[in-house]
Amino acid sequence: MDELLNDVVPQEDLERFEKKYHHELELDGEVTSETKFEYAFCLVRSRYTNDIRKGIMFLEDLARTHPDGRRDYIYYLAFGNARIKNYTEGLKYCKAFLEIESNDQVRSLEEYIKKQSDKEIAKGMAVAGGAALVLGGILGLGIAMSRK
């Protein structure tokens, strides 16, 4: 799963679908759901967090307005959120997908997100514990020096 989540879209693909998206937007004032999905798919696979967030916004809009492709939109919403370490949202979308259908790839993504989330929680607890120790040491030193 690490390999899949770390695979980035080639820049030329991103530029090609971005051009197609803007061309449709300029021509008709709107974009087909297919073009919007293609562009969002590239964005969530970008190396840049802002691109991923933009792709997530497009996918959320597509999931709301085009129920026919909802399955794909939800998967890439989980995928994109996992890439930017928004694990709570990623898990929410994995569960939503699994309510629609059983899928090994989505289960694998769900497990990956849970493991990464647990790691982040453990890191946070270690940092908080370390900070508490440092603060306790400073307070102890302060109290010891004030008694002299």
Image (spheres, rainbow, N blue to C red):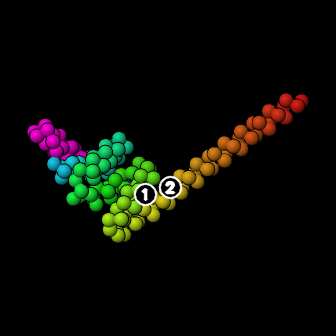
Residue 48: quarter of image: top left
Name which residue lies at 45% across and 64% down: 111
Separation (CA) of disc 2 from disc 1: 10 Å
The answer to whether marks 2 and 1 mark residues whose Cβ atoms lie closer than 8 Å is: yes
Q: Which mark is residue 117?
A: 2
Q: Which badge, 2 or 1, comes first in the chain's sequence?
A: 1
Residue that carries the numbered disc 1 in the rendered image = 91
Name which residue lies at 58% across and 48% down: 124
Q: Main secondary structure of the magenta part?
A: helix
Query: Which residue is outermost to the right?
Result: 148
Q: Position of residue 11 (x, y in %)?
A: 26, 46
- The answer to whether residue 46 is seen in the rendering is no
Q: Is 17 part of what is drawn in magenta?
A: yes
Q: Position of residue 81 (x, y in %)?
A: 39, 51
Give the residue type at disc 2.
Ser
Q: Which residues are magenta?
A: 11-31
Q: Is residue 3 left or right of residue 116?
A: left
Q: Nearer the viewer, residue 49 or 27?
A: 27
Q: Position of residue 100 (x, y in %)?
A: 32, 65
Q: Secondary structure at mark 2?
A: helix
Q: Label 2: few (<14), some or many (≥20) within 10 Å?
A: some
Name which residue lies at 61% across and 50% down: 125
Q: Label 1: few (<14), some or many (≥20) within 10 Å?
A: many
Give the residue type at disc 1.
Leu
